[in-house]
Amino acid sequence: MIKTDHISIQCPQCGHTEFEQPENVKDDDFVKCNSCHFEIMLADLKEVGIEQAREVVIPEAKAEIEKMLKKAFKGRLK
Ligand SMILES: [Zn+2]
């Protein structure tokens, strides 16, 4: 299974997160989805993973920042 820091990369075709991969897989090797057999170059799969990580992380970060801003404004309104 290929993993980024915390989030598994999902197959762009079916959303499965396990891929067949050769040993010592390199960026220009192809990996194959265990579920739908979609083949993708590891470098491209990593790109997909980065995009997916952004979609997950940004809304959470935004909520945290909004919370912090609300607290900051509360303090000033006293
Ligand atoms: Zn798949």
Image (tube, rainbow, N blue to C red):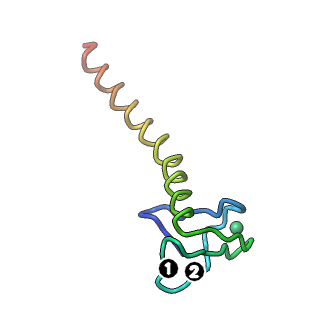
Residue 35 is left or right of residue 55, and the answer is right
Please, what secondary structure does the residue beneath circle 1 have? loop
**Percent x, y of residue 32:** 65, 75
Q: Residue furthest front?
A: 28
Q: Amino acid at mark 2?
A: Gln
The C terminus - image quarter: top left
**Percent x, y of residue 4:** 45, 64
Residue 41 is left or right of residue 34, and the answer is left
Q: Residue furthest top?
A: 77
Q: Residue at x 64, y 64 (%)?
A: 11
Residue 8 is left or right of residue 20, and the answer is left
Residue 55 numbered tag: none
Q: Residue at x 60, y 75 (%)?
A: 31
- Separation (CA) of disc 2 from disc 1: 6 Å
**Up-down: is 52 above or below 13?**
above
Q: Residues within 10 Å of mark 1 (few under 14, many from 20)?
A: few
Q: Are marks 2 and 1 in contact (CB under 8 Å)?
A: yes
Q: Amino acid at mark 1?
A: Val
Q: What residue does disc 2 label?
A: 21
Q: What residue does disc 1 label?
A: 25
Please, what secondary structure does the residue beneath circle 2 have? loop
The N terminus - image quarter: bottom right
Q: Residues within 10 Å of mark 2 (few under 14, many from 20)?
A: some
**Up-down: is 1 above or below 67?**
below
Is ligand 1 within 8 Å of the beta carbon of the residue shown at mark 1? Answer: no
**Percent x, y of residue 61:** 41, 41
Is ligand 1 within 8 Å of the beta carbon of the residue shown at mark 2? Answer: no
Q: Residue at x 28, y 24 (%)?
A: 72
Q: Residue furthest right?
A: 36
Q: Residue at x 61, y 62 (%)?
A: 10
Among the 4 quarters of the image, the one containing residue 14? bottom right
The answer to which of 70 and 8 lies nearer the viewer is: 8
